[in-house]
Image (cartoon, helix red, strand yellow):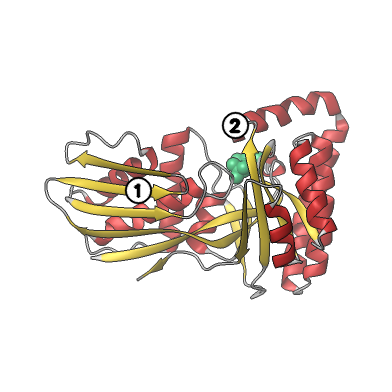
């Protein structure tokens, strides 16, 4: 009946400061969640695979079941609300995105489910609408969510985001990046809470750090418009120093950042909440990727991607 492909995302600059109203720069990446929908009977039957896992579930038309896939279930119910009818279907989801590592896996799966299941109603949701509905799904499941992830995976490319405002940067730079991930020591919520505590310890320096991160993001959007990747890299490296000062970069992540630079990356920084998770490096590509593979749990060589695509 139909098929959709939705990218993941990586944060290039601005994490943590974005929580305090400053902008951030995110990029959609070519690691995808693919979802296909076909006719079903009596329920919405879902099969979902992701790196290291697989789940199968059945969501009754009475809304029961499927609790093991909360994002998928919330997305299905969102479509019911939107269409005012409950259709049986088979939904098959396969994601390349590791769960919970800051690469937008939950946004990508939510948006893919919304888009694919809507096809069974003969409706092709627009990327803008998917970003909004996807965020509602994330808020429903997590309690809070920044609009960053669902915007990035729905619209694609490079996006500057601050609160509810966003700007799609049509640089056409086809940015390549190496992403290297290790286990997370704190969840996003815990790392945001840690930074809130740092505000008291750092006093006025805290505001200076956030302000500087905000201005790095503004400069990065100019660098992208000027197609100046070297400048973008310099800004990312400075952002890393400020994240280190905030205290969210663990030894293991710092080791990845340093190794990436030693292997020839022009930029390397943590991406997302920190306390482990992923680092992102620009420049150097294959050599950096294979060098980091020896010390990271997972390494991806990615390229900037378009947003949602229907097949
Ligand atoms: O690690 P992630 O992708 O969950 O990103 C967290 C980014 C923060 O700025 C730290 C929090 C947020 O909600 O924006």
Residue ID at (28%, 55%)? 117
Point 56% across, 43% down: residue:
146
Check mark 1 vs ligand 1: CB closer than 8 Å? yes or no. no
Which mark sits nearer the N-terminus, 1 or 2? 1
Report the quarter where the C terminus lies: bottom left
Which label lies toward us, 1 or 2?
Answer: 1
Viewer-proximal residue among 179 and 81: 179
Residue 27 image position (x, y, % from top left): 61, 60
In this rendering, position of residue 147 left or right of residue 140? right
- State the residue position of label 1: 48
Secondary element at image label 1: strand
Total marks in image: 2
Residue 179: quadrant of the picture:
bottom right
Question: Residue at the spot x=69%, y=39% of the render?
Answer: 274
Judge whether 146 appears above or below 173 on screen: above
**Viewport quadrant of the N terminus:** bottom left
Residue 249 visible somewhere in the drawing:
no
Structural distance between the alpha carbons of marks 1 and 2:
25 Å
Mark 2 lies on a secondary structure that is: helix
Quadrant of residue 37 within the rendered picture: bottom left
Residue 204 placement (x, y as % from top left): 87, 32
Residue designated by label 2: 189
Ligand 1: does it lie within 8 Å of the C-beta at label 2?
no
In the rendered image of this protein, does residue 70 appear above or below residue 222?
above
Residue 232, given in percent of the width and then of the height, sits at: 78, 63
**Residue 65 visible in the snapshot:** yes
The numbered dot on residue 19 is none
Judge from the rendering whether residue 60 lies leftward or rightward of residue 222; answer left or right: left
């Amino acid at each position: 009946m139909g098929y959709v492909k939705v990218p993941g995302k990586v944060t290039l600059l601005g994490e943590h400061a974005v929580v305090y109203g400053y902008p951030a720069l995110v990029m959609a990446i070519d690691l995808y969640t693919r979802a296909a929908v076909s006719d079903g009977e009596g329920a919405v039957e879902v099969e979902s695979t992701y790196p290291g896992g697989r789940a199968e579930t059945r969501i009754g038309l009475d809304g029961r079941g499927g609790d093991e896939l909360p994002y998928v279930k919330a997305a299905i119910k969102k479509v019911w609300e939107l269409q005012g009818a409950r259709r049986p279907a088979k939904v098959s989801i396969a994601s390349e995105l590791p769960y919970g590592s800051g690469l937008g896996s939950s946004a990508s799966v939510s948006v893919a489910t919304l888009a694919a299941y809507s096809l069974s109603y003969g409706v092709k949701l627009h990327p803008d609408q998917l970003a909004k509905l996807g965020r509602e799904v994330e808020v429903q499941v997590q309690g809070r969510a920044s609009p960053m992830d669902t915007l990035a995976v729905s619209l694609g490319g490079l996006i500057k985001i601050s609160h509810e405002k966003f700007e799609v940067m049509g640089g056409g730079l086809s940015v390549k990046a190496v992403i290297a991930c290790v286990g997370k020591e704190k969840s996003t919520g815990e790392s945001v809470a840690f930074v809130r505590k740092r505000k008291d310890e750092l006093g006025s320096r805290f505001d200076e750090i956030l302000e500087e991160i905000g201005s790095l993001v503004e400069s990065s959007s100019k660098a992208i418009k000027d197609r100046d990747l070297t400048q973008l890299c310099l800004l990312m490296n400075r952002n890393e120093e400020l994240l280190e000062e905030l205290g969210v970069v663990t030894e293991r992540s710092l080791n990845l950042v340093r190794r990436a630079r030693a292997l020839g990356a022009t930029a390397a920084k943590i991406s997302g909440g920190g306390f482990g998770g992923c680092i992102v490096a620009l420049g150097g590509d294959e050599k950096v990727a294979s060098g980091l593979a020896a010390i990271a749990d997972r390494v991806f060589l990615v390229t900037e991607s378009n947003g949602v695509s229907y097949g």
